[in-house]
Amino acid sequence: MLAVDVEKQLGAFKVAVRFEAARGATALFGPSGAGKTTVVNMIAGLLRPDHGSIILDETVLFDAKASIDLPPHQRRIGYVFQEGRLFPHLSVRQNLDYGRRMSGRPRDAGEFERIATLLDIGHLLDRRPRALSGGERQRIAVGRALLMRPRLLLLDEPLASLDAAHKREILPYLVRLRDDAGVPIVYVSHLPAEVRRIATDVVRLNAGHVVATGGLELLDDPEADAFA
Amino acid sequence: MTSLLGLSADEWTAVALSLRISVVATACALPFGIAIGWLLARKEFWGKTLVDGIVHLPLVLPPVVTGYLLLISFGRRGPIGAFLYEYFGIVFSFRWTGAALSCGVMGFPLMIRPIRLSLEAIDRRLEDAAATLGASGALVFLTVTLPLALPGIIAGLILCFARALGEFGATITFVSNIPGETQTISAAIYTLTQVPGGDAAAGRLVLVAIALSLAALIASEWFAQRAAIRIHGD
């Protein structure tokens, strides 16, 4: 269970959100500029909230009052960025292995194999990120985040940089991920169709605030933003 | 007495000494080059412009002035030189170590610039990604920042090495021109041109200097290409 209650002032723009995300996939849904990426960056520890707290299961990741602010490398939160952000100087295999190496865990061939199969990336291991298509790149980014054994997976518009064909290609993998990987997912998107395929719960954001929380029915409610 | 390439033993001594001084100067300058390059590229601090200026000063000062400043500060009676001798037994004046120091100082601005530029060009978002994957600050630096800055670091190394190999004014002012101790190729050529009949020996050393400089340039090109391929693929 992820419990987020944070405020952050960014120039004239203020983000103040409060929501909880349980097992399964929770969508942070809202138009561009609603503050979705700001929120996930705070969950990941890349951006420091001004006030509030972020709690994941029993771990306090951030608590302004108690001056707790776990650095990103100690949070064990997998983050799949919009643009993949694969390391250009490493091969696909080394990219996938990065999280394990940083944590000093021994190699686990079975786990590697399982995730390579889940994402169908076994044939790409010796390539460089540059030689991959957009869809392949995002699958590697998902695999890299999974192989660090995250307690939570953040997917920030992972399909945004892909064309329609590549989106269709990668969506089934994300659904499989939700059902098989057993890691709670926070999925950021502004596209109802995408959210419908993947999410089970929806947190609707607008102008830096949560305007509604609930199930997929929120996607059909064009009036929800009116409460902002 | 002649040996390989027709160089005399004394001439070989100067060549070997030049190489040793340049290698040591470059190797010792590198950690400082990376640290200060990183500070200038990434940090905002009070006096940054001053640090930038001081680092680049040897580039614009007459080398004799730099050598003189080294002499009065790092000489046995200079404030820094006296301290280093007293507590660490390190002596710079009239030693090859002093030549390495002056060569390192003279090469430093040439080393800093490409390192700083390559650090500035790195996509910081890759470092964020590494942090979310469990890499502490130091590990991010070692596994992402440094490898991505490698082409700039190599360029800086070669430029510093080449500058060290050609250093003359600051070195001769600081540690004089002692055969076998501080007489580099440049100093040896200068000495030979001052004595009758030294032209042939000077000519041989000139050829060596040209060969070494060319080799450094070719090596830098080769390393830079390899590093670029490593980072950007084919």
Image (spheres, coloured by chain):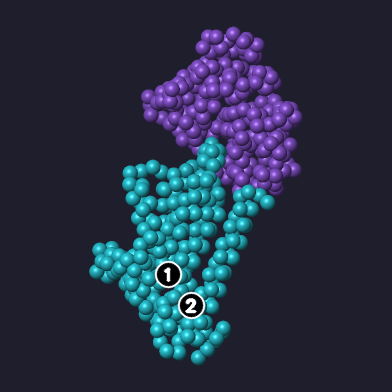
Chain colours: A purple, B cyan
Q: Return the x and y of residue B126 as percentages of the image width and height.
A: 55, 41
Pointer 1 indicates a residue of which chain? Answer: B
Residue at far bottom of view? B1
State the residue position of label 2.
B15
Compared to residue B14, the image places residue A167 above or below, namely above
Identified at 41% across, 67% down, the residue is B103
**Element class at badge 2:** helix
Q: Residue at x 61, y 61 (%)?
A: B222
Residue placed under numbered mark 1 in the picture: B167
Is residue A28 toward the left or the right of residue B94 in the image?
A: right
Q: Nearer the viewer, mark 1 or mark 2?
A: 1
Image position of A39 (left or right of B76): right
Looking at numbered disc 2 in the image, what kind of residue is underneath it? Val
Task: Using the image as rendered, state which of residue A58 and residue B186 is in the foreground.
Answer: B186
**Mark 1 burial class by Cα count in 10 Å: few <14, some 14-19, many 20+:** many
> What residue lies at 73% left-to-right and 28% top-to-bottom?
A164
Count of numbered circles on the image: 2
Q: Earlier in the sequence, mark 1 or mark 2?
A: 2
Residue at figure coordinates x 46%, y 58% from the top left: B111
Where residue B232 appears, as percent x and y from the top left, is: 63, 49
Residue B142 image label: none
Element at badge 1? loop
Q: Position of residue B116 (x, y in %)?
A: 47, 51
